[in-house]
Amino acid sequence: MIAIYARVSTEEQAKKGFSLEDQLKECRKKANSSEVIEYVDRGISGEILDRHALTRLRNDVRDGLITKVICLDPDRLSRKLMNQLIITDEIEKRGVELVFVTSEYTKTPEGNLFYSMRGAIAEFEKAKINERMSRGRREKARQGKVLRNFQIYGYDYDKENSQIIINQEEANVVRLIFNLFTQPNDLVEGINGIAKYLTNKGIPTKRGAKVWHRQVVRQLLMNRVYTGEFYQNRWNTEGMLGNKYKSKEDRVPMRERPKEEWIPIECPAIIDVETFEHAQRLLNESRRRWAKKAKHDYLLSGLLRCGNCNNTMVGMKVSNWGVKELVYSDYKNYSGANHPGCGRRIKVEKLDQEVWDTILQWLNAPEEIAAASERAGEEEKPNFEEIEMERLKSEINKMKNGRKKLLTLFSEGLEISEEEIRESLRELKDKEERLTKDLKDLEKARKNIDQHIYGKRLLQEAAEFYFSKGQKELTFEDKRSLIRHVVKEIRVYEDRIKIYTF
């Protein structure tokens, strides 16, 4: 039996079928027989060895069903020389004749050399094609064009202008998700609650699914594109092409490139940066804050930490002289606990009341909160920190350019000793590191100021929610939602508590 093998590497070619049909037509002419079996791989790259039709062909050769294999060209068998040689060796070991339409192949030293050279050239051509395509995509990205439709919820892809544009209907859902997660409300609790809410409202996902999963909501909340930050050339997908044909152990993972290689693309923002950063802080603590339901409800669950041993404090029921009472405790009795705790206990009723009274004091001063937020929203004049940050950035760039100039001078063969070059490079590097540290310290200080301003805004939002319902109508869940909205953590000491806000 004569076997014909044909392959096309893209889904587009496979659907149109022109290239594929041409291969089969030429191979049938070469076979000049009606006793043929056709093995066809559609839309699979030649870099992959484990192809469905090719695997069947190799098995049939091994089982002695095939006497001759006809293929248009060696690069249809594989685009990698090593894989070509593996397949060829398997075929010839069984005494099967291997024939190519575009070239003569003979089992002689000269024939083997020519065959290997063709394989090496095919592999080189494939690498060059990939390199040119990658370079072209990077250049297109540097021109501010979006390479493809990334299917980002809240946005559409303008193919004509190669840009991301806002999908207003989806953008409203994005804003809703962030509002539900970061603001006090009566509708949902946590990420899972948001997913159920969207599902119940019949809002479809980007792919049209009717059910929202909590992980989809979480990924959306973590996506910085909603603040206008969108990057291309961020991920290195080299070697991932054939992952779906490989076992889990052999699959190549996606790797993140160094940040300096990322290419920023202009993208319209849907969420302001402050809201996004607040969502990230809540996400980091979501495991503590939205733990599974306990037998008893605790107003401060997920927020308490012992000021002495640093253990988290949880609510529990204990027996005190035969009387059952609820307490918050830092004691950890499970295996693997880093620290068993210092044994601090405080009555739930006492601590809940103390914290709630403090929150009420803050909430009952809406005029001060509003004034603080109003001042925060005013346009600020350039201050010392901003001027100094710009100066440091300029100095860091000078250090980098200085190192490049030194290396250029050395490569041009000027009379500078290698030791002098090393010493100068070392000095520039040390200075750059000091400047970078100073810049990070200033940025951190600036971020703390911004966070403090945003914290006042959160408090104002909480006050509006509180006064809209009235203190007497606030349920236990309302109180807990309000506290979690403004409080990041509560440290419990022997004689006092300290409340940290966002």
Image: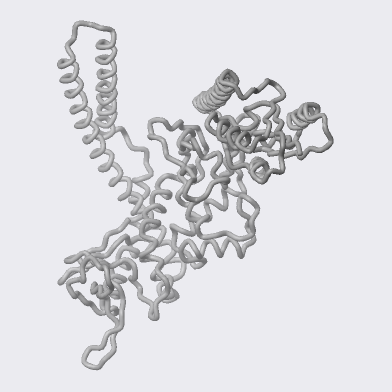
Q: Residue at x 61, y 45 (%)?
A: 168
Q: Residue at x 50, y 37 (%)?
A: 239
| Residue 133 visible in the displayed image | no
Q: Nearer the viewer, residue 346 or 366?
A: 346
Count of labels in the image: 0
Q: Quadrant of residue 259?
A: top left
Q: Quadrant of residue 403?
A: top left
What percent of the width, then of the height, locates residue 318? 27, 85
**Residue 329 versus residue 61 in the image, above or below:** below
In the drawing, does residue 171 fall left or right of residue 27?
Answer: left
Q: Quadrant of the C terminus?
A: bottom left
Q: Nearer the viewer, residue 318 or 492?
A: 318
Q: Nearer the viewer, residue 260 or 451?
A: 260
Q: Quadrant of the N terminus?
A: top right
Q: Residue at x 67, y 30 (%)?
A: 98
Q: Residue furthest bottom?
A: 322
Q: Nearer the viewer, residue 289 or 148?
A: 148
What percent of the width, then of the height, locates residue 345? 21, 77
Q: Quadrant of residue 258?
A: top left
**Residue 407 versus residue 245 in the image, above or below:** above
Q: How is the image coloured?
A: one colour
**Residue 20 versus residue 463 in the image, above or below:** above
What percent of the width, then of the height, locates residue 325? 28, 86
| Residue 478 visible in the displayed image | yes
What percent of the width, then of the height, locates residue 87? 59, 35
